[in-house]
Amino acid sequence: MTITMLLQLCVVLGALWVGSRYGSLALGAISGIGLAILVFGWGMKPGNPPTEVIYIIIAAVTCAGIMQASGGMDWLIQLAERMLRKHPDRITFLAPLCTFFLTVLVGTGHVVYTLMPIICDIALKKGIRPERPCGVASVASQVGITCSPIAAAVVAFVSISNANGFDVTIPRVLMISIPASLCGLMAAAALSYHRGLDLDKDPVFQAKLKDPEQRRYVYGGGATTLDKEIPQSAKNAVFIFLGALAVIVAFAVFPDLLPEYAIVKAVKGAKELTLDGAVAITPDQLAKAGVTVGGVTEMKMVDLKMNIVIQIVMITAAALMVICCKAQPKKAVAGPVWQSGMVAVVAIYGIAWLADTYFSNYLGEMQAMLTDIVKDYPWSIALVFFLVSVLINSQGAVVVAMLPLAYQLGIDGPVLLGVLPSVYGYFFIPNYPSDIATVNFDRSGTTVIGKYLLNHSFMMPGLVCVSVATVVAYALSMMIY
């Protein structure tokens, strides 16, 4: 590795580190500064921005945001709360399951903000230390991203893998990631079950209760959604959303259902005509239209790609919610799901473009340095995924930025599928919005960041969950493939 290569790597890492300090849109925007330095300062060839993944995120987030605007998300939260309040003594296990499956359904972990105060309230009223369910529930809300059929991380993994010769579908990814993640979550919940002192034995908490004002603050919240009346239109929006997910999964499971279209290309002669996805047309339709191409033509039929299927289905479902379920587009744009999704778009756009620019220019050097390591220990790429995630706070961005490099290093697809859970590492430094919000929602003060930053409430459940999930996913992938 040359001095120039090291300096340029420092630019990449510095842009990611500074961007993570500012958070939100700054993560992607500040990556642009690093990109400008590499391209204009060192004259490096720009990489390719991840446009396909971005389009999918926009479609999925628009659909989920409109469902939230219709009130459908309130109904899902209400169903989760009803179950949690029915079994309050099991909240340390049930809370992460609720946040996990909400993320699986919607494709983003930011849907948990309404549920987290409810989890805290139930724990306090049952006398359970809120840190126990809250810490693992916050982790679960992010773990679910690699288990969602519409999440950018899953779709990007499938798209990039197919382009590199690993024929995998979304359902096959979920067959590995969902059971593995559930094993990791239950292991983390089991270790959290007796975590910390019980509230009645915690001297810090008991001292706080001696102040009448603090006591009212701790026990006076009473967050709930059960008193909210959910209209039928909101429930219908949820049904439309679930129907859209079912259609996407059906096309992935049964690819023969996908429509075909013709690609026509002149292989000899001056004129060339290519119909590549822009127009769905059969050979008979082409002949009837009187289309002629100079020279000898080559025609083949190809299936519609799944990334296009997801986009079409999601925006169609969004439109149906607006028309049939009284969803207000302006309200959707102002909602947290749509806004957090657009932040993710900018982050992935900047981060993945910056990373692709650097790695594509030094692919030969990377292969020379890492080939022996990944040949002997292919699972070690999981450590790389995890460390990159700590820096960039986006599982989708980790997949888009690092998976092509992993394939180019010669790592087999089943290995990469097995280590997919390792792309979640941003719990390590507790600066992610869901973690910060969880700390603020816990009125007891037991869910903490910690004096030394890394001794926070999310470290243990995060490490346990990701480690167990990665080991289980790796074992499942090796067994299946």
Image: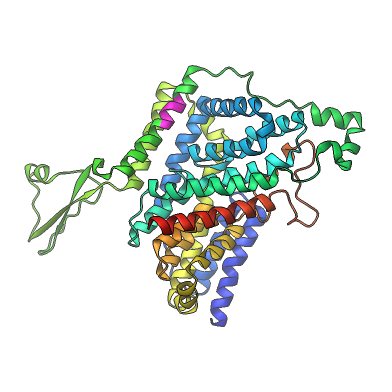
Residue 349 visible, this orientation: no
Residue 379 shown in magenta:
no
- Where is residue 151 shown, x and y percent of the image? 47, 45
The structure residue drawn at horizontal position 32% and vertical position 43%, both measured from the top left corner, is: 253
Residue 238 shown in magenta:
yes
Q: Quadrant of residue 79?
A: top right
- Where is residue 284 shown, x and y percent of the image? 9, 43
Q: Is residue 62 left or right of residue 291?
A: right
Q: In which quarter of the image is the C terminus?
A: bottom left
The structure residue drawn at horizontal position 63% and vertical position 29%, both measured from the top left corner, is: 84
Q: In this view, does 150 lie to the left or right of 35?
A: left
The structure residue drawn at horizontal position 52% and vertical position 17%, both measured from the top left corner, is: 231
Q: Name, please, the residue furthest toward the front.
A: 479
Q: In which quarter of the image is residue 115?
A: top right
Q: How many labels does the image show?
A: 0
Q: Is residue 29 left or right of residue 479?
A: right
Front residue of 208/127: it is 127
- Where is residue 242 shown, x and y percent of the image? 42, 31
Q: Name, please, the residue furthest toward the bottom.
A: 2
Tell me: residue 363, above or below residue 107: below
Which residues lie in the magenta part? 237-242
The structure residue drawn at horizontal position 56% and vertical position 34%, both measured from the top left corner, is: 335
